[in-house]
Image: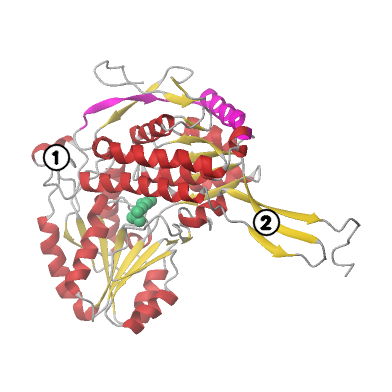
Amino acid sequence: MPTNDASVPTYHNYIGGAWVPAADGRVIANRDPANGELLGYVPDSGQADAERAVQSAKDACDSWRKTPAPKRGEILYRVGRLLEERKEALAQQMTREMGKVLVEARGDVQEAIDMAYYMAGEGRRLFGVVVPSELPNKAALGLHDPLGVIACITPWNFPMAIPAWKTMAALIAGNTLVLKPAPDTPFSSISLVEAFNDAGLPPGVLNLVCGGAEVGMPLVRHADVAGVSFTGSNAVGRLINVEAAQQLKRVTLELGGKNAIIVMDDADLDLAIDGIVWSAFGTTGQRCTACSRLIVHRQVRAEVEQRLLARVAQLRLGHGLEPTTDVGPVINATQRERIHSYMAVAHQEGARLLTGGDFATEGDLAQGNFYRPTLLTDVTPTMRVAQEEIFGPVLSIIEIGSLAEAIAVNNHTPYGLSSAIFTQDINRAQTAIRDMTTGIVYINAGTIGAEIQLPFGGTRGTGNGHREAGLGALEFFTEWKAVYIDYSGHLQRAQIDS
Ligand code: UN1
């Protein structure tokens, strides 16, 4: 437990509409990954806090479920407006705690605003179904019911967008929530909850507990939690799924990717290079959707490598608040070590380092967790650097000789989140759309930048089949209720009477 430094703010959990410290008073320090600066403290919550938060969400369930969905939507509209008004301050706060460059932090807040308006509109839709009955004088319809109390456990790489995806979809559907943000980036979630509070969300409908697994796992195990929405690592996702399965809880998992960009020999290379640099090194490679494999046709490989090298040499590392910075720090020292451990793996397996491959420590960079943008080449499809998620600024280059080979390499990983192809040939593009087995496919654009009105998620080890955002999210956060209304006045037996 760090010593409490009074010169920085100490934030609390939000339970039952009140800001409260952890039951045992423990706190975690929040630091700027670019320079180690102490930003403040948040509660290091545990079992007792989880129980309190779940009880509060449970108490609020009945009245929130019965609040008309358009009224729930009005609150979300207000949240959207508040986030718009506060966007710049929220983005700066996010850059400080997470490290992503300011322009990207603004995008992260914008994604939350987009989601607020999208889900607010859903308050006037939440479409069910009306179908004909096989019997006369009988109506048949399907309605969406909320699940009850949901635990939302969110990662540090999209500190506001992902908490917004989860909470806004779950709330419009009539659920009540406990949100537990990643310990590395709690401030953005606290600010999001402040916006809900200021927008008039009734007490208990959304609760926030800060901390790590000591509060996360009690939420997952709690008998009154009906569903868990988790984004994070594969290892933690599996644990959560196994725990939740004991009680047959509904779980959605979004666990990352090993996303690839294919560059064919007919590609517009200017465009492709822009897409690769943005997807591989934007957010310092710390997006689930980040491009970590470049699958390039042998005819253009040499040129692409040479141009990438030139572009990577121009990328400026630094604090994300500096307007000149292209690439911020990685989130923490552990992640940086983990990224770096892949350099030895790559070397052992015969990959060749083109550039990067080490900590960046010159000048002020020495104070933070900086890692050099890295290109590995001569990578083959089954090497560990082509199969495992590294989650940092590392791009593995794989040469192929045909579209069929490119697609086979693209599909052959334990993940299936996002893939992209650069080609000017419509037949190749259509073939790729048909045959690439990821949840998201881009044509002539990089692997990052999904919009909230389409389902977000992936195949294979990326998750467990559910989708976030778009209408996919509402499927997860609701149960179908089938309703039969017999107005014939006598007993009608389905499948028997005609
Ligand atoms: C993530 O990395 O988990 O599509 C989310 C994108 C962003 C969301 C990424 N809109 O890159």
| 173 relative position to 302: left or right | right
Q: Label 2 amino acid?
A: Gly
- The colour scheme is secondary structure
| Residue 365, disc | 1
Say if mark 2 contacts mark 1, CB within 8 Å.
Answer: no
| Position of 498 relative to 151 (above/below) | below
Relative placement, left or right, of 225 versus 482 is left
Q: What residue range appears in magenta?
A: 36-62
Q: Give the quadrant of residue 61.
A: top right
Q: Nearer the viewer, mark 2 or mark 1?
A: 2
What's the residue at 20%, 75% (across, down)? 268
Give whichever of 1, 185 is nearer the camera. Answer: 185
Q: Is residue 45 visible?
A: no
* Quadrant in the rendering for residue 332: top left
Q: Secondary structure at mark 1?
A: helix
Query: Residue 340, position in %: x, y?
Result: 26, 49
The amino acid type of the residue labelled 1 equals: Leu
| Rendered-image quadrant of the N terminus | top left
Q: Is residue 209 left or right of residue 112?
A: right
The residue that appears at 23% across and 81% down in the rendered structure is 266
In the image, residue 354 sits, relative to residue 76, either above or below, namely below
Q: Position of residue 264 (x, y in %)?
A: 27, 78
Q: Position of residue 59 (x, y in %)?
A: 61, 28
Quarter of the image with the C terminus is bottom right
**What is the count of numbered marks?**
2
Is residue 298 at least partly visible in the picture? yes
Q: Is residue 464 magenta?
A: no
For disc 2, the neighbor class at 10 Å (few under 14, some 14 to 19, many from 20) is some
Residue labelled with disc 2: 142
Q: In front: 441, or 45?
A: 441
